[in-house]
Image (cartoon, rainbow, N blue to C red):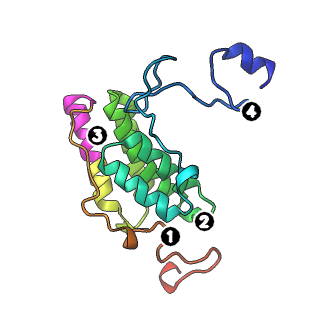
Amino acid sequence: MNETQATRFPERDRNEEGRAENARPRDRFGRPLPRGAVDEMVHKEEPEDVVSTVEEAFDRAVALFDEERFFEAHEFLEYVWKHESIDPADRDFWKGVTQVAVGCCHTQRGNTAGAVRLLERAVSYLDPYPDQHRGVDKQALSHAALRVAGDIEEHGAGPHLEFPASRGHEPARSSPTAGRVPPGERTRDDR
């Protein structure tokens, strides 16, 4: 950590490289709590520690999303989005999927403006992709994100809102790389 970082952010947790890394306890929605508070996410798992493929990370994210554990789901979706095996052409798609989870997390936290902005931005990232893409029903996810954004504008953000679920996600057929063509190759449909 350099001297400027230590001066500007003296209370901030940092890793060995000096990057911000929050080690404070969190509430069930992922908000940092004061030091010494009871960590409501003590059983939270880091994707790098529990999965070895993007398929496993995606399946874990879907399960967490369906349990309305959006903060944790977003961590696994971010793992998918940024994984080296994901085609660069799909990065914006996975960014959009991740932002739906983040938007739902901000909804649970009561952040009205941030939640609406993230959900609407997520849909804009998803828009260019086919309705069914990489094991995700993009159309249903986009509609659900916009419905939540509308509910927020009407009733305010909070954990009381109804959130979307995957409705029967089947891991074997819902893989982020299922049917993926290796980088540099294209199918007849991609041309």
Q: Residues within 10 Å of mark 3 (few under 14, many from 20)?
A: many
Q: Residues within 10 Å of mark 1 (few under 14, many from 20)?
A: some
Give the residue at mark 4: 16
| Element type at mark 3 | helix
Q: Nearer the viewer, mark 4 or mark 3?
A: 4
Whether label 2 touches label 1, CB < 8 Å: yes
* Distance Cα–Cα, label 4 vs label 1: 33 Å
Ranked by sequence position, the earlier of labels 3 and 1 is 3
Q: Position of residue 15 (x, y in %)?
A: 69, 32
Give the residue at mark 3: 149
Q: Nearer the viewer, mark 3 or mark 2?
A: 2
* Residue type, label 1: Thr
Q: Position of residue 129 (x, y in %)?
A: 42, 64
Give the residue at mark 2: 85
Give the residue at mark 1: 177
In this rendering, the answer to whether 113 lies above or below 140 is: above
* Distance Cα–Cα, label 3 vs label 2: 32 Å
The residue shown at (32%, 34%) is: 107
Q: Nearer the viewer, mark 3 or mark 1?
A: 1
* Distance Cα–Cα, label 3 vs label 1: 29 Å
Q: Nearer the viewer, mark 4 or mark 2?
A: 4
The residue shown at (53%, 45%) is: 46
Whether label 4 touches label 2, CB < 8 Å: no
Ranked by sequence position, the earlier of labels 4 and 1 is 4
* Residue type, label 2: Ser
Magenta segment, principal secondary structure? helix
